[in-house]
Image (cartoon, grey):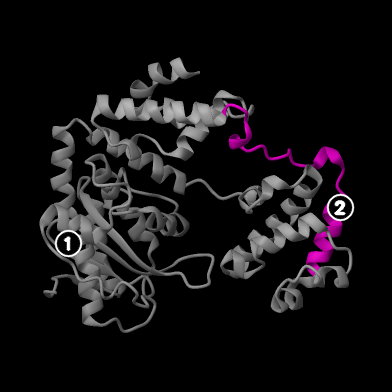
C-alpha cells in the first residue's frame, strides 16, 4: 500500500490552524472516520479521528488534545462517513452534536443496488477500482506510538472516501435517489442521538416475551441495575451479568443463596453480585400489580401474522419493480413488523406513523399498504 499524505495533529499548537480554518470556511463537505477500541467495555474508546477536505488529510490524536473545540468546529460542516453507526455513537457521546448533514456512503451504495452492508474495502474497489489493504484493521488504536503503516491505513480511510462519495452522489442524482439516501442517512443518524433508557433494557433480554407481568417486573429491575452498572463501570453489558442469567433470576426468583446457586450462574457472577441480585429480586417482588410491565405480545403471535407478512413482502416486491429501488433498501422484516404492530394497535401509545408511511417511503407505499390493511 502506498504511503498516504497527511498532517498528524497531536498538540494544541498543531490543532489551532485547523480550528481557524474550519471556523472561518463556509460549510465544507468533509470525509470523516474514527478508529476506536471496544474490548470488554460498554463504551467504544476513540483512538484516532481522520478528516479529509479534498485537499488535506488530518489525523487527530484525541488522547493528546482537548477535542471539544474541534467537535464544535466540525459541526459547522457537512459530513460523509461509511457505515457510520459506531462512529456516530462515539461522536454523540463525546460531543453531542453532528454535522449540518451526515451522509452514509454505505446507505448511498445500497440505493444503487450494492446491498445494505457493503464494506469500505469493497466500496472503494467498486467505485474507484482501488484495492485497499485492511491488515491494520485490528490495531490497538489506543497504543502509542502508532506505526507509519497504521497511520497510512487510517488516512486512506478518508482520502478515498470523499472521491467515492462524489461518484455515487452523481449516480444517485442521475437516478433521482440522492435526496432519499440523504434522508435515510439523517434518520439513522438521528437514532444515534436518542439515549438508551435503562428502564427499557428488559425488553432486549432474550425470551423476555415468555415471562408473565410479575416476572417481567423482576426482569425490569434487574436489567435496569445491570445497564447502570455497565455504564458506570464501563463494562460490556454481559460482563456484568449475562442476559440469560437475568432471565433465569426473573423466572425462578430465588430468595436465598442456596436457591441462587441452583441456577448455575458462573462462579464470578455469584461471588461479585450474588447478594446484590438476591436483594434486587426481593425488591422487585414487593411491587404491586399496578407497577408490573405489560405482558410482551409478539407480533408473530397474532393469528393473521403469516398471511399479512407474506402479503406485505409481495407489496415490497411490487414497489421495487415500480421504483427500481432494491427491496432491501425499501424495507426489512423489522420495518414490516413495525407497520403491522401499528396497524393492529399493538402499541396503542405510539402515535407516530410507522416508517413505511413516512418520508421518502410514503408516496411509494401509501396506496399499496392501504389495500392490504
Could you tell me which residue is drawn at 13 percent across and 33 percent down? 174
Q: Tell me the residue at 45%/52% (across/down).
A: 96
Left or right: residue 109 versus residue 188 is left
Residue 291: percent from the left, percent from the top?
A: 81, 41
Instruction: Check if residue 297 falls in the magenta segment.
Output: yes
* Disc on res. 202: none
**Separation of marks 1 and 2 at Cα, in angstroms:** 57 Å
The first of marks 1 and 2 along the sequence is 1
Choose top left, top right, bottom left or bottom right for residue 12: bottom left
Q: Nearer the viewer, residue 293 or 149?
A: 293
Q: Residues within 10 Å of mark 2 (few under 14, many from 20)?
A: some
From the viewer's side, name the closer residue of 140 and 337: 337
Magenta span: 276-304
In which quadrant will I find the N terminus? Answer: bottom left
Instruction: Count every numbered label the image shows and give the total.
Output: 2
Please indicate, yes or no, whether residue 78 appears anywhere in the rendered image.
no
In the picture, the disc for residue 159 is 1
Report the disc number at residue 285: 2
Q: Quadrant of residue 296?
A: top right
* Residue 244 rendering spot, x and y as whole percentages: 67, 61
Q: Residue at x 25, y 44 (%)?
A: 108
At a point 21% along the width and 79% down the height, the residue shown is 149
Position of residue 108 in the picture relative to residue 334 (left or right): left
Q: Secondary structure at mark 2?
A: helix
Q: Residues within 10 Å of mark 1 (few under 14, many from 20)?
A: many
Camera-side residue: 90 or 356?
356
Secondary-structure class at tag 1: helix
User: Residue 26 or 299: which is nearer the viewer?
Assistant: 299
Percent x, y for residue 166? Answer: 15, 47
Residue 248 drawn in magenta? no
Does residue 316 show up? yes
Amino acid at each position: 500500500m502506498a504511503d498516504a499524505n497527511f498532517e498528524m495533529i497531536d498538540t494544541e499548537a498543531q490543532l489551532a490552524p485547523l480550528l481557524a480554518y474550519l471556523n472561518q470556511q463556509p460549510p465544507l463537505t468533509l470525509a470523516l472516520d474514527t478508529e476506536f477500541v471496544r474490548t470488554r467495555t460498554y463504551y467504544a474508546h476513540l483512538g484516532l479521528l481522520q478528516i479529509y477536505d479534498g485537499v488535506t488529510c488530518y489525523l487527530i490524536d484525541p488522547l493528546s488534545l482537548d477535542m471539544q473545540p474541534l467537535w464544535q468546529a466540525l459541526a459547522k460542516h457537512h459530513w460523509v462517513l461509511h457505515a457510520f453507526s459506531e462512529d456516530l455513537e462515539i461522536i454523540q457521546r463525546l460531543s453531542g452534536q453532528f454535522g449540518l448533514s451526515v451522509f452514509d456512503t454505505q446507505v448511498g451504495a445500497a440505493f444503487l443496488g450494492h446491498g445494505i452492508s457493503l464494506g469500505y474495502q469493497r466500496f472503494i474497489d467498486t467505485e474507484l477500482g482501488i484495492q485497499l489493504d485492511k491488515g491494520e484493521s485490528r490495531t490497538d488504536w489506543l497504543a502509542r506510538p502508532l506505526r507509519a503503516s497504521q497511520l497510512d491505513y487510517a488516512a486512506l480511510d478518508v482520502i478515498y472516501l470523499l472521491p467515492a462519495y462524489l461518484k455515487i452522489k452523481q449516480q444517485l442524482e442521475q437516478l433521482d435517489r440522492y435526496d432519499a439516501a440523504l434522508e435515510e442517512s439523517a434518520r439513522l443518524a438521528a437514532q444515534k442521538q436518542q439515549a438508551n433508557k435503562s428502564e427499557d433494557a428488559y425488553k432486549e433480554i432474550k425470551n423476555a416475551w415468555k415471562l408473565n407481568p410479575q416476572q417481567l417486573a423482576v426482569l425490569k429491575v434487574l436489567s435496569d441495575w445491570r445497564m447502570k452498572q455497565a455504564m458506570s463501570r464501563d463494562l460490556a453489558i454481559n460482563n456484568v451479568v449475562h442476559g440469560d442469567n437475568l432471565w433465569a433470576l426473573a423466572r425462578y426468583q430465588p430468595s436465598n443463596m442456596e436457591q441462587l446457586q441452583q441456577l448455575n450462574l458462573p462462579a464470578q457472577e455469584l461471588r461479585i453480585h450474588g447478594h446484590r441480585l438476591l436483594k434486587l429480586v426481593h425488591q422487585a417482588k414487593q411491587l404491586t400489580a399496578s407497577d408490573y410491565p405489560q405482558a410482551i405480545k409478539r407480533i408473530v403471535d397474532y393469528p393473521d401474522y403469516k398471511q399479512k407478512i407474506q402479503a406485505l413482502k409481495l407489496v415490497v416486491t411490487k414497489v421495487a419493480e415500480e421504483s427500481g429501488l432494491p427491496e432491501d433498501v425499501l424495507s426489512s422484516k423489522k420495518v414490516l413488523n413495525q407497520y403491522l404492530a401499528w396497524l393492529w394497535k399493538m402499541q396503542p401509545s405510539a402515535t407516530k406513523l410507522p416508517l413505511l408511511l413516512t418520508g421518502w417511503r410514503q408516496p411509494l407505499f401509501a396506496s399499496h399498504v392501504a389495500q392490504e390493511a
